[in-house]
Amino acid sequence: MCDDVKFEKSSGNVFKDIGFSDKEAEVLSFRTKLTFEVFTLLKKSRLRNVKAAELLAVDPTDISKLKDGDDDHFSLACLSDFRDRLERHIEDRGTLSDNDDTKNVTDTLGVGK
């Protein structure tokens, strides 16, 4: 039975691998990484949903949605703004180091803030 299993090498983008166009796959991958960054920074900030909502100027239910990975109703610009606000909040508190792996997925992707 194990002999019937076939493997394909990944392109490095799961969205491309499952059939999205190159452009769609790039956007979806970027959105996923940015949402994960926001999620990680929300966790690191230790802000309760109400306080995080105040900081990001959204409803507390939006914070719950973000923590659940539901980012469909936020633009990439909005997610980027959330990330920037959370980074500033954490930096102001002195808890984000320069080598923190959650910083600036956009730098890795070559996209400006």
Image (cartoon, rainbow, N blue to C red):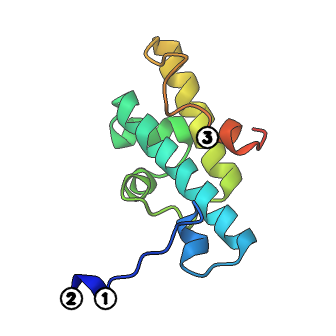
Residues 81 and 49: in front is 81
Query: Is residue 27 found left or right of 102 in the rendered image?
Result: right
Identify the amino acid type marked 3: Val
Q: Are marks 1 and 3 in contact (CB under 8 Å)?
A: no
Q: Quadrant of the C terminus?
A: top right
Label 3 vs label 2: CA separation? 41 Å
- Going 70% across and 50% down the picture, which residue do you hit? 77
Image x and y of residue 50, in percent: 38, 41
Q: Amino acid at mark 2?
A: Met
The secondary element bearing badge 3 is classed as helix
The residue sitting at 49% across, 74% down in the picture is 8
**Mark 3 burial class by Cα count in 10 Å: few <14, some 14-19, many 20+:** some
Residue at the far left: name it.
1
3D distance between C-alphas at marks 2 and 1: 6 Å
Residue nearer the viewer, 23 or 75: 23
Numbered disc in front, either 3 or 2: 2
Closer to the chain start, of discs 3 and 2, is: 2
Q: How many marks?
A: 3
Which residue carries the number 3 mark?
Answer: 105
Image quadrant in which you'd find residue 15: bottom right
Q: Residue furthest top?
A: 94
For the residues labelled 1 and 3, the Cα–Cα distance comes to: 38 Å
Query: Contact (CB < 8 A) between labels 2 and 1?
Result: yes
User: Residue tagged by mark 2?
Assistant: 1
Q: Residue under circle 1?
A: 4
> In the rendered view, would you say 28 is above or below 33?
below
Secondary structure beneath disc 1? Answer: helix
User: Which badge, 1 or 3, comes first in the chain's sequence?
Assistant: 1
Do the residues bearing badges 3 and 2 touch, measured as CB atoms within 8 Å? Answer: no
- 40 in relation to 28, above or below: above
